[in-house]
Image (cartoon, rainbow, N blue to C red):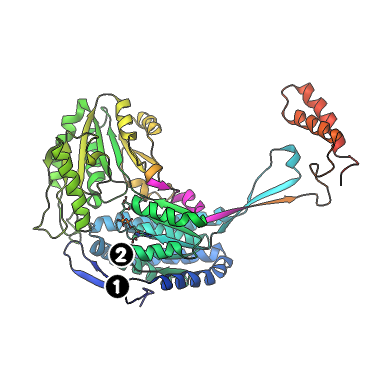
């Protein structure tokens, strides 16, 4: 059996959200078990780093091969435990991880090479500088349920290839997917102590934060992120926090309405709206508003809702009752404040316990929760605007800043609009899919968190940098060492003139004045 750690106290069940069926019961790992896992990881990490990047790349490639061979099995499990349609498990989970392995293998060697740092200041030219990137040691990864495979796996691969050990605490709603990741990594050759999974709830996650990990990479809600930041603060434990979003989309008047409505419907409803990058609010130019809304309603009504394991399904269940209640509360608040419901707005109990119909709302305002708080469900609220500046202002009026999108038939205009949006990622004529670009950094400012995952910036989070400054002339006493006095001060004034004065003559005079510093007798 994989390293799911057992303890007598707290138990929970992993369930299929489409049916409510219990898939397996688990005991939460206790604090001591989490600490023991971290201690084992520390014990093994130095050897993993010493084996070198080439060795680690080979293992990641083996993992990629294995995952590709077993893609259907893994995707089926993701659908079973997280509810999403099988096609989304393949594309948004498996493909993301297969390509993250490709990215890590291609980039890690050059990334970990010592990086020479040329010195610009003349006085520092006799020194050579080099930047080293070294692993933190043990990275604690805490992950959510909505991308139970791609989120922890892409972070894990970046951590492993850069020489860290990883202890993963997956969501209590999707432990089986995490155990599958563990099985695949171990089979591919990752030593057992270098990648471990500790199963449990929030208290188990909290124990991981309090353990001897060297860094935490957390993906989840703002409230949990805030608790983790507070727990980490006393010992300055470094953190990456990938938190929530309330992503806006702007449909400009020159957009292709058929494409834009298809893209917005997909961006709002894929994974039943339970994506940190989901479109959660839509601003449409008034001149095309009615036609755009009509197209969205027609397309939303056409979506096939059902069990994700049916290949025809386009929208699966939501993850659990609590998430449905949030969606219902946001929709009820909007309707009470004057919003208009054009489709959906109800549960679909005939399909199973957690189904909610794709919902389109208009006549919404920023006084409604549906436009300001993360809904995390299949709801698309649409609001008109008159001028682009107003749309940008509305889009930027948010506590979040994860991502945004713009729809226009003019790519140059789209890029110009993108520059004015305050978000970590802006997509022009698409949404969500930047998450699947392994080179693209993922993360955003304000309540959306701290730091980045994915891409080179995500890899930077997995290492600490060390600067090595080495003098090329070991026997030379440095100019700035002791031996101060009025003559030395004058020489240094001259030297500053030599380096920074505006006129050539002043600079040359300064250079002459400074020469004596090199030969000064007073230096000790
Ligand atoms: P959550 O915060 O409830 O749980 C996330 C993880 O944290 C789980 O593993 C949970 O057990 C653990 N946890 C809970 N309390 C903890 C504590 N005190 N200390 C340590 N760990 C603790 O979030 P969720 O409901 O699983 O996920 C949904 C949220 O995640 C949404 O807000 C979504 O926007 C966000 N999310 C963000 C990204 C991103 O990349 N920015 C990606 C996916 C999901």
Classify 216 as above or below 370. Answer: below
Q: Can you give x and y, in whole percent of width and height, for residue 481 in the image?
A: 80, 44
Q: Is mark 2 within 8 Å of ligand 1?
A: yes
Q: Is residue 186 above or below residue 287?
A: below
Ligand 1 is located in which of the four quadrants? bottom left
Q: Callout 2: 10 Å neighbours few (<14), some, many (20+)? A: many
Answer with left or right where residue 17 lies relative to residue 457. left
Q: Which residue is at 46% across, 73% downward?
A: 36
| Magenta segment boundaries in residue numbering | 448-466
Residue visible at 47% across and 69% down in the picture: 38
Q: Residues within 10 Å of mark 1 (few under 14, many from 20)?
A: some
Answer with left or right where residue 509 lies relative to residue 191.
right
Is-magenta flag for residue 464?
yes
* Position of the N terminus by quadrant: bottom left
How far apart are the two marked residues, 2 and 1, measured between alpha carbons? 9 Å
- Quadrant hosting residue 153: bottom left
Q: Is residue 369 above or below residue 4?
A: above
Residue 518 is a magenta residue: no
User: Does residue 114 appear to the left or right of 398 in the view shown?
Assistant: right
Q: Is there any visible trace of residue 192 in the rendered image?
A: no
Q: Is residue 461 above or below residue 66?
A: above
Label 1 near label 2: C-beta < 8 Å? yes
Occupied quadrant, residue 250:
top left
- Secondary structure at badge 2 equals loop
Q: Secondary structure at mark 1?
A: strand
- Residue that mark 1 sits on: 26
**Residue 189: % across, % down:** 46, 71
**Count of numbered labels shown in the rendering:** 2
The residue indicated by pointer 2 is: 172
């Amino acid at each position: 059996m994989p390293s799911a750690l057992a303890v007598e106290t707290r138990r929970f069940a992993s369930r299929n959200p489409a049916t409510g069926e219990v898939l397996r019961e688990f005991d939460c790992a206790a604090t001591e078990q989490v600490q023991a896992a971290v201690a084992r990881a520390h014990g093994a990490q130095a050897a993993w780093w010493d084996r070198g990047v080439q060795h680690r790349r080979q293992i990641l490639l083996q993992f990629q091969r294995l995952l590709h061979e077993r893609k259907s099995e893994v995707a089926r499990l993701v659908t079973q435990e997280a509810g999403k349609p099988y096609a989304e498990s393949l594309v948004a989970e498996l493909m993301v991880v297969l390509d993250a392995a490709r990215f890590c293998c291609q980039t890690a060697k050059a990334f970990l090479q010592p990086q020479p740092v040329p010195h610009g200041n003349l006085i520092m030219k006799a020194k050579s500088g080099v930047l080293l990137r070294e692993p933190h040691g043990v990275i604690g990864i805490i992950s959510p349920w909505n991308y139970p495979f791609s989120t922890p796996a892409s972070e894990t691969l970046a951590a492993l290839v850069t020489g860290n050990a990883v202890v993963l605490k997956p969501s209590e709603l999707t432990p089986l997917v995490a155990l599958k990741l563990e099985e695949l990594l171990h089979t591919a050759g990752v030593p057992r102590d270098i990648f471990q999974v500790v199963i449990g709830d929030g208290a188990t996650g909290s124990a991981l934060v309090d353990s001897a990990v060297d860094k935490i990479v957390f993906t989840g809600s703002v409230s949990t992120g805030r608790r983790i930041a507070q727990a980490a603060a006393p010992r300055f434990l470094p953190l990456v926090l990938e938190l929530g979003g309330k992503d806006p989309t702007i449909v400009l008047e020159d957009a292709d309405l058929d494409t834009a409505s298809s893209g917005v419907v997909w961006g709002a409803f894929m994974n039943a709206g339970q994506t940190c990058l989901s479109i959660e609010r839509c601003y449409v130019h008034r001149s095309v508003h009615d036609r755009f809304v009509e197209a969205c309603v027609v397309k939303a009504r056409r979506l096939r809702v059902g069990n994700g394991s049916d290949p025809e399904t386009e929208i699966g269940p939501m993850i659990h009752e609590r998430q449905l209640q949030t969606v219902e509360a946001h929709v009820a608040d909007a309707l009470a404040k004057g919003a208009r419901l054009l489709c959906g707005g109800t549960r679909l109990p005939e399909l199973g316990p957690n189904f909610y119909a794709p919902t389109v709302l208009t006549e919404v305002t920023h006084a409604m929760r549906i436009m300001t708080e993360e809904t995390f469900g299949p709801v698309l609220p649409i609001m008109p605007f008159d001028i682009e500046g107003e749309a940008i202002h509305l889009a930027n009026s948010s506590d979040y800043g994860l991502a945004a999108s713009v729809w226009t038939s003019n790519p140059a205009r789209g890029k110009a609009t993108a520059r004015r949006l305050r978000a970590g990622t802006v997509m022009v004529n698409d949404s969500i899919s930047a998450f699947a670009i392994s080179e693209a950094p993922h993360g955003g400012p304000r309540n959306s968190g701290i730091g980045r995952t994915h891409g080179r910036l995500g890899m930077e989070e997995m290492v600490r940098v060390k600067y090595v400054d080495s003098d090329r002339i070991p026997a030379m006493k440095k100019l700035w060492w002791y031996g101060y006095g009025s003559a030395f001060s004058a020489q240094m004034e001259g030297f500053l003139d030599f380096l920074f004065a505006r006129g050539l003559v002043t600079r040359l005079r300064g250079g002459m004045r400074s020469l004596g510093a090199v030969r000064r007798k007073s230096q000790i």
